Image (cartoon, rainbow, N blue to C red):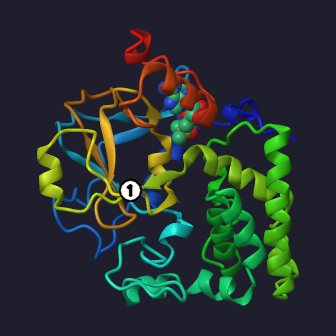
Amino acid sequence: MLLTLASRKQRWTSPFKQLLLNSYIFNHFYSTTSNDITESQPSQSTPPPIQVLLTESTGRGVFATRKIGSGELIHTAQPFVCHPYFSSLHTVCYFCLKKLANGDNSGVNFCGDSCRKQAMGFCEVENQADWSAFDTHCRTRGLKYPLLVRRLACMVLSGVASSNSLDILQPAILSPQMIALMEEEFGLLRCALLDADLTGEKMAFLTKQWYIGVLARIRINAFRIELVGGSYEDLLLSASSSVNAEAAVGSAIYMLPSFYNHDCDPNVHILWIENVNARVKALRDIEEGEELRICYIDASMNYKARQTLLSEGFGFQCHCLRCLSYD
Ligand SMILES: C[S@@+](CC[C@H](N)C(=O)[O-])C[C@H]1O[C@@H](n2cnc3c(N)ncnc32)[C@H](O)[C@@H]1O
């Protein structure tokens, strides 16, 4: 099976569907929690100054609905699904990826009761199964994204997410070799759940096609979470896209941030201060109607390295102004 974009793109073209898309995204995925962000937070009563529209050549994109000032916090976003990397499993909160002062090496940890409670649904399902074969498979191959699929599967089984939640996101085009590797992971995931007596109607969604479709979306839309720490005000003062982030602690999928297209000289940047909750900030003045773009990769790389990474990782050739001048 080869997942193609062409058929999906037809579903995105109607203006009516765009309107529905915006209201769907803003109603479901633009939010902050009460214990999340306290400083410089955009008003919760007004929607963020952006809308998702169809671009001429890069699918959907995010556009400013008014002038946005340099350094402005455009919106915040909570992940739909996230997971720590194996290397951070005992040092960050299993739910929000916040660094822990005292991690416990014998199991997963939470930064507080709120996170423990919110994780209860998927943890109850996860704890029923023996994940040693699945984990060994992923660890030895350095695979991170299957952990996100497993968490989503456990969220669906516990009733806190629907199996088609990620369908709205653009999928990667997969080669037969990639699909063959995914089939092996899928087998291990399904076996772990079946061996834990999770069977019947509620497991019906967990097909090979579901697994591959979710992973195809995760490949293009997952964010690598690097916590910068420090104060948000300090970061706002520097309108720079390069911040001193510590090593990545995990990965996450967001809805609204997934609609931002790429530019090697971006006007918008996404930051993580103390946990997986993201802040989207303007790097310079942005005019009404201008497209907001982030940089998917390390912007300090040279032209050739950027093109290779974008082509192999995201499946496109970058024609941004910086690339057009071979900078
Ligand atoms: C995270 S999605 C961005 C939103 C996407 N345009 C959509 O309609 O859902 C990433 C995908 O968008 C497209 N894209 C993003 N930036 C692009 C660019 N500068 N040039 C060409 N395609 C781009 C590529 O297909 C890429 O794999």
Q: Is residue 283 left or right of residue 189?
A: left
Picture layout, residue 276 above or below residue 54: below
Q: What's the residue at 33%, 60% (across, down)? A: 227
Foreground residue, 219 or 68? 219
Image x and y of residue 75, in percent: 31, 52
Residue beneath the point at 29% across and 43% down: 49
The structure residue drawn at horizontal position 21% and vertical position 36%, both measured from the top left corner, is: 68
Residue extending farthest to the top is 325
If the picture is divided into quarters, which one holds ligand 1? top right
Q: Is residue 15 visible?
A: no
Badge 1 crowding class, 10 Å Cα cut-off, few under 14, some 14 to 19, many 20 or more, is many
Image quadrant for the C terminus?
A: top left
Look at the image and tell me in which quarter the N terminus lies.
top right
Q: Is residue 65 above or below residue 214?
A: above
Q: Picture coordinates of residue 156 (x, y %)?
A: 68, 73
Kindly state the secondary structure of the residue where label 1 is placed: loop
Amino acid type of the residue that numbered disc 1 sits on in the rendered structure = Glu
281 or 244, which lies in front?
244
| Residue at (67, 51) in percent of width and height | 167
Q: Please tell me how many numbered marks the rendered image carries.
A: 1
Quarter assignment of residue 264: top left
The residue labelled by disc 1 is 226
x, y (%) of residue 64? 32, 34
Q: Is residue 15 above or below residue 137?
A: above
Direction from residue 53 to residue 32 in the image, left or right: left
Q: Is residue 282 visible?
A: yes
* Near-viewer residue (167 or 25): 167
Question: Where residue 15 appears, x then y in whole percent?
Answer: 54, 32
Position of 241 relative to 119 (above/below): above
- Corner quadrant of residue 187: bottom right
Horizontally, residue 213 falls left or right of residue 264, namely right
